[in-house]
Image (cartoon, rainbow, N blue to C red):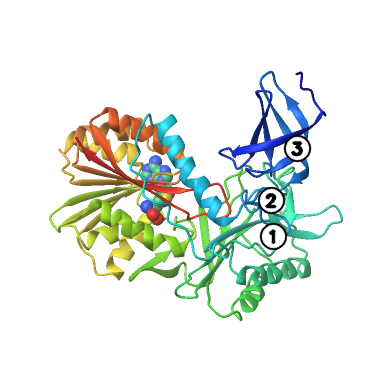
Amino acid sequence: MEFYKNQIVTVVIEHMGNDGEGIGKIDGYTLFIKDAVAGDRVQAKIIKAKKNYGFARLMNIEEPSRYRVEPPCAFARQCGGCQLQALSYSQQLKYKEEKVRNNLEHIGGLREIPMEPVIGMEEPFHYRNKAQFPIGMDRDGHIITGFYASRSHTIIPNRECLLGVSQNEEILDILIAHMEKYHIAPYDEINGKGLVRHVLLRYGFHTGEIMVCLILNGSRLPGAEKLADRLFSMEGMTSFMINVNKKRDNVILGDRTMLIRGKTYITDYIKDLKFCISPASFFQVNPHQTGKMYEKALEYAALTGEETVWDLYCGIGTISLFLARAAKKVYGVEVIPQAIEDARENARLNHLDNVEFFVGKAEEIFPDKAKRERVHADVIVVDPPRKGCGWELLDAILHVMPPKVVYVSCDSATLARDVKYLAEGGYEVVKVCPFDNFAMTVHVETIVLLSRR
Ligand code: SAH
């Protein structure tokens, strides 16, 4: 059978790919269909036909999957934020468990993977403690805010994201009204003109503290004090800051941040530890899952109080401090200087003095120390961004050869690649536990315990 562009076909969706797309076959020809769910029989229009596979657009659901649910958000299909809202939550958890297993098998070359059941959420909405809304203008000249459409920078107006907290909407209303009143132009990516680019919102789930940080293509906001008055009439408002970003790229935050009113950070708890969080610092976005995840990391590390631990990619020292209470000494490494300042403050705040932090790239600092200072480590924890650890770092870990490595990952493909490298270098995978920290999206967090053979 020949397949061609604009052809309408009927397909049964067999499974779902890494980006949440439905995958089905007709006579051995594979079709990838966004928004289709495993178990659906759908009518779809081919938009790109290659020799052995193609991409199609979902036109009509002829027979819905038993796992299909009505997405609670009206923008679920357009928005690039959620990919799995049409899939029942229990099936989302299965999908993520399979994703981790598949990557560890196919990329990691592992067999008989010691997987623990995925740790899911009780209430999989309104869990994010951080939101970044782009500000723009629609065709009629109205200031809008919302979310980028899937794979684009077109803003879909929506102030009420179901993953975020309800306070976000009121803050956005206040901000847009202020911009209208003072005739402040939103930033325009095409020509680099206009002032307001993004607004970054943080909320401390356990403290109720709120941070508003405006990202400006400039350093002065007209009527800033008036806006501060209005924002600080909200309960919990703790920090109002401006971040300056005049660069013409996609990175949201610039290098310079100025305080307008309140504090330069908010605080929040993970379990009984307290943390200061600055605008530029990384902080786990799902407060309901973070504590469970760190407890698992602690369980895998199985500390007795005698150990030296390295926490690489430590952010504001959250895992470091969790482990410090059960270890002799913890060293943390993190590339963002502000995050390390937070980390040192957090150690003081929690009266932990057996931790030491270094600013720099983990793949430079750790190999350098391993080479020059004969580093000792009983446990190394790594928690890299999506691109995973660099080879230089993995080689240094294999040089130091601690009895245990605890790998915390937000991308199971790079996790699998790195685990393979460590396995070939003398480690074995003892346990794997996926966590659903990003419900409704295709992303999954995973912790792996590796032990020296
Ligand atoms: N373990 C922390 C942070 C994990 S997120 C937590 O659970 O909160 C990953 C962190 O790695 C971020 O703070 C990011 O700023 C940092 N990072 C990114 N690239 C890095 C690099 N090359 N070296 C060190 N840290 C890096």
Any part of residue 253 in sight: no
Circle 3: residue type: Arg
Any part of residue 374 in sight: yes
Q: Residue 171 location, x and y as percent?
A: 65, 70
Mark 2 and mark 1 lie on one chain; the one further toward the N terminus is 1
> Could you tell me which residue is drawn at 65 percent across and 45 percent down?
37
Mark 3, secondary structure of its residue: strand
Mark 1, secondary structure of its residue: loop
> Could you tell me which residue is drawn at 76 percent across and 45 percent down?
61
**Few, some or many residues within 10 Å of mark 3 (<14, 14–19, 20+):** many
Circle 1: residue type: Cys
**Few, some or many residues within 10 Å of mark 2 (<14, 14–19, 20+):** many
Alpha carbons under labels 2 and 1: distance apart:
10 Å
Q: Nearer the viewer, mark 3 or mark 2?
A: 3
The quarter holding residue 179 reads bottom right
Q: Is residue 212 above or below residue 424?
A: below
- Could you tell me if the residues under marks 2 and 1 are in contact, i.e. CB atoms within 8 Å? yes
Q: Residue 443 location, x and y as percent?
A: 52, 47
Q: Name the image quarter holding the C terminus.
A: top left
Residue for badge 1: 73
Does any atom of ligand 1 lie closer than 8 Å to the CB of label 2? Answer: no
Mark 1 and mark 3 lie on one chain; the one further toward the N terminus is 3
Residue for badge 2: 79
Mark 3 and mark 2 lie on one chain; the one further toward the N terminus is 3
The quarter holding residue 145 reads bottom right
Q: Is residue 166 left or right of residue 357?
A: right
Residue for badge 3: 57
